[in-house]
C-alpha cells in the first residue's frame, strides 16, 4: 500500500512539474529596447509650450499567447533624471518638482487588461488599467494603446493625458515665479520590445 501511495505521489509530482514547464514554455517575455523606443512629455507654460524626452527606459511584457496579444504582465520604468529638455535650468526645475533625490524612477505596472481588439496584420487595440507611480505617488490609471507584433518584435504606441497635481507634483515655476507651468501634460510613447 505504501509503495502504491509513493508511486502515485511520484506520478503526481512529475505531472505537476510537466504542467509548470509547459506553462512557462508558453509564456513569452519581450524586453524594452531603449535605443529604439521614445517617450515624450509635452506641456505648456505662461511663456511657451515645452517638451522633455526620456533617455533611459526599461521594462518588459509577458504574454500568455503573443499571437493573440494575451498579455499577462507589463512593467515599465523611466529614470526620472533621464528626462531631458535640452535646457539645464528647466531640467533642474523638473527634477526639483519630481523630488528626484527621493524618487529616482517613474514606473507603470499593469493591473488588468480590459479589452483587446484585433485589427489584422498583427495589430491590436488594447485597453488596460495599471498603477502609475510618479514622485512616490501611485495612482490607478486607464491606459489605451496600439500593440503591433511582427516577427518577435512588439511595439506599443499611444498617449496619455495627466495632471501633475494628481501625483502631488507642483507645476514648476521659473524666474522668481514669473513663468508658470501648466498642470496638464501629455505623455506620448512609441515603445519597442524584443526577445
Image (spheres, grey):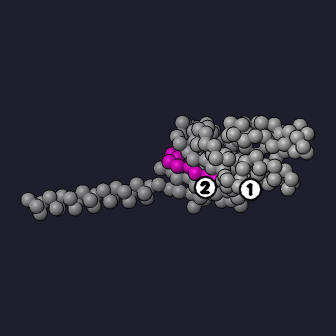
Query: Which residue is at the far front?
Result: 176
The verdict on residue 70 being magenta is yes
The residues bearing labels 1 and 2 have C-alpha atoms spaced at a distance of 17 Å
Q: Is residue 122 left or right of residue 185?
A: left
Residue found 52% across the figure and 53% down from its top: 62
Q: Residue furthest left?
A: 1
Please give the count of numbered marks on the rendered protein.
2
Expressed as whole percent of the image width and height from the top left, the position of residue 51 reads 82, 47
Asked whether 144 or 165 is in front, the reply is 165
Question: Observer-nearest residue: 2 or 172?
Answer: 172
Give the quadrant of the N terminus: bottom left
Question: Residue 43: percent from the left, percent from the top?
Answer: 80, 41
Residue 95 appears at what percent x and percent y?
Answer: 76, 51
What residue span does the magenta drawing correspond to? 66-77
Residue drawn at point x = 32 percent, y = 59 percent: 17
Look at the numbered disc 1 and give the secondary structure of its residue.
helix
Q: Is residue 132 left or right of residue 187?
A: left
- Residue at figure coordinates x 84%, y 42% from the top left: 173
| Quadrant in which residue 176 is drawn | top right
Q: Is residue 126 visible?
A: no
The chief SS type of the magenta part is: strand
Q: Quadrant of the C terminus?
A: bottom right
* Of pointers 1 and 2, the one earlier in the residue sequence: 2
In the rendered structure, does residue 120 fall within the stretch colored magenta?
no
Q: Secondary structure at mark 2?
A: strand
Whether residue 50 is visible to the viewer of this picture, yes or no, is yes
Q: Which residue is mark 2?
A: 59
- Which residue is disc 1 drawn over? 81
Amino acid at each position: 500500500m505504501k509503495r502504491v501511495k509513493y508511486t502515485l505521489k511520484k506520478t503526481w509530482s512529475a505531472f505537476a512539474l510537466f504542467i509548470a514547464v509547459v506553462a512557462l514554455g508558453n509564456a513569452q517575455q519581450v524586453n524594452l529596447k531603449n535605443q529604439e523606443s521614445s517617450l515624450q512629455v509635452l506641456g505648456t507654460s505662461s511663456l511657451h509650450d515645452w517638451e522633455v524626452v526620456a533617455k533611459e527606459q526599461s521594462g518588459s511584457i509577458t504574454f500568455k499567447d503573443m499571437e493573440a496579444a494575451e498579455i499577462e504582465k507589463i512593467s515599465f520604468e523611466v529614470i526620472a533624471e533621464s528626462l531631458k529638455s535640452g535646457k539645464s535650468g528647466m531640467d533642474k526645475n523638473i527634477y526639483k518638482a519630481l523630488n528626484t533625490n527621493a524618487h529616482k524612477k517613474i514606473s507603470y505596472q499593469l493591473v488588468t487588461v480590459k479589452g483587446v481588439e484585433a485589427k489584422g496584420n498583427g495589430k491590436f487595440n488594447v485597453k488596460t488599467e495599471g498603477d502609475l507611480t510618479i514622485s512616490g505617488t501611485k495612482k490607478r490609471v486607464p491606459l489605451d494603446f496600439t500593440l503591433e507584433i511582427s516577427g518577435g518584435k512588439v511595439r506599443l504606441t499611444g498617449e496619455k493625458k495627466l495632471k501633475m497635481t494628481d501625483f502631488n507634483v507642483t507645476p514648476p515655476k521659473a524666474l522668481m515665479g514669473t513663468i508658470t507651468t501648466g498642470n496638464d501634460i501629455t505623455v506620448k510613447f512609441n515603445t519597442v520590445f524584443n526577445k
